[in-house]
Image (spheres, grey):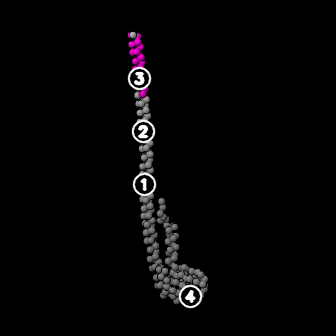
Amino acid sequence: MPDIVSKTDNFLKAIEKYAAEQRSKLESEAEDFKEKELNKAEEDGLKEAYVLLQRKMSAINTSIARELSKAENASRKSIFVKRQEIEDKVFERAKEKLIKFADTDKYTEKLLESVRKISVKLTADDVVLYVNQRDMKLKDKIVSVFGKKCDVQPSSEITIGGITGISREMGLLADETLDTRLSQQREWFCENSGLKVTE
């Protein structure tokens, strides 16, 4: 019988040993599984955090770009307004000087020279010459220099001086006004002054 007991003890020990090995193996596998799952969860969490971070960074960049654009547009508008103020002052002074010039004998000579130029262009009998109201005092001289039939009328559109001739029969207009010349100079000034709004 002692042989059976010894065999039974050995068998039980072998089962216990096998069970201990299996338990150890299962514990090790469970630990590996747990570690892998934790690593996977950590990676997933990092990926989600990265995606969230990228979205937030993109939103911040968009917001910054929008604010920079707004500030740049405001700055450009401010520069444009300043440029316009400078231009307006320059041309207001020029207009004042031209109005003073319109009270001189030299202006009268230039006006009559303009009448001669218009008389060459407009040869029909229906010519109407328009001048500033203050130049109506020169009406007789204007008609005399024009040399043909014409009518001289005041024009509220001529604020500085000069003369405009119109022939409906010929379908022509001859503009020799200081107002138009100043306006053309303004266009030239805008293109050539160097006062530009740039990025």
Dot 1 corresponds to which residue? 63
Residue furthest to the front in view is: 1
Residue occupying the point 42% across, 38% down: 41
Q: Is residue 186 shown in magenta?
A: no
Answer whether residue 8 is magenta in the image.
Answer: yes
Seen in the picture, residue 30 relative to 171 is either above or below; the reply is above
Kindly state the secondary structure of the residue where label 2 is placed.
helix
Is tag 1's residue or tag 3's residue first in the polypeptide sequence?
3
Q: Where in the figure is residue 113, as x and y percent of width and height?
A: 55, 82
Q: Position of residue 153 (x, y in %)?
A: 51, 86
Residue at x 40% of width, y 12% of height: 4
The amino acid at mark 3 is: Ala
Comparing labels 2 and 3, the label whose residue is closer to the camera = 3
Marks 1 and 3, how far apart at CA = 64 Å
Image marks 4 and 1: residues in contact by CB distance under 8 Å: no
Three-letter amino acid code at the position of disc 1: Ser
Where is mark 3, residue-wise?
19
Q: Nearer the viewer, mark 4 or mark 1?
A: 1
Callout 3: SS? helix
Q: In terms of secondary structure, where does tag 1 sit?
A: helix
Q: CA distance from mark 2 to mark 4?
A: 99 Å
Query: For the point 47% across and 79% down, which residue is it?
Result: 160
- The residue wearing badge 4 is 150
The front one of 66 and 176 is 66
Dot placed on the residue nearer the N-terminal end, 2 or 3: 3
Cα separation, mark 2 vs mark 3, equals 32 Å
Residue 117 appearing in the image: no
Mark 1: few/some/many CA within 10 Å (<14, 14-19, 20+): few
Q: Amino acid at mark 2?
A: Ala
Q: Amino acid at mark 4?
A: Cys
Q: Which residue is mark 2?
A: 41
Q: Which segment did they paint magenta?
A: 2-26
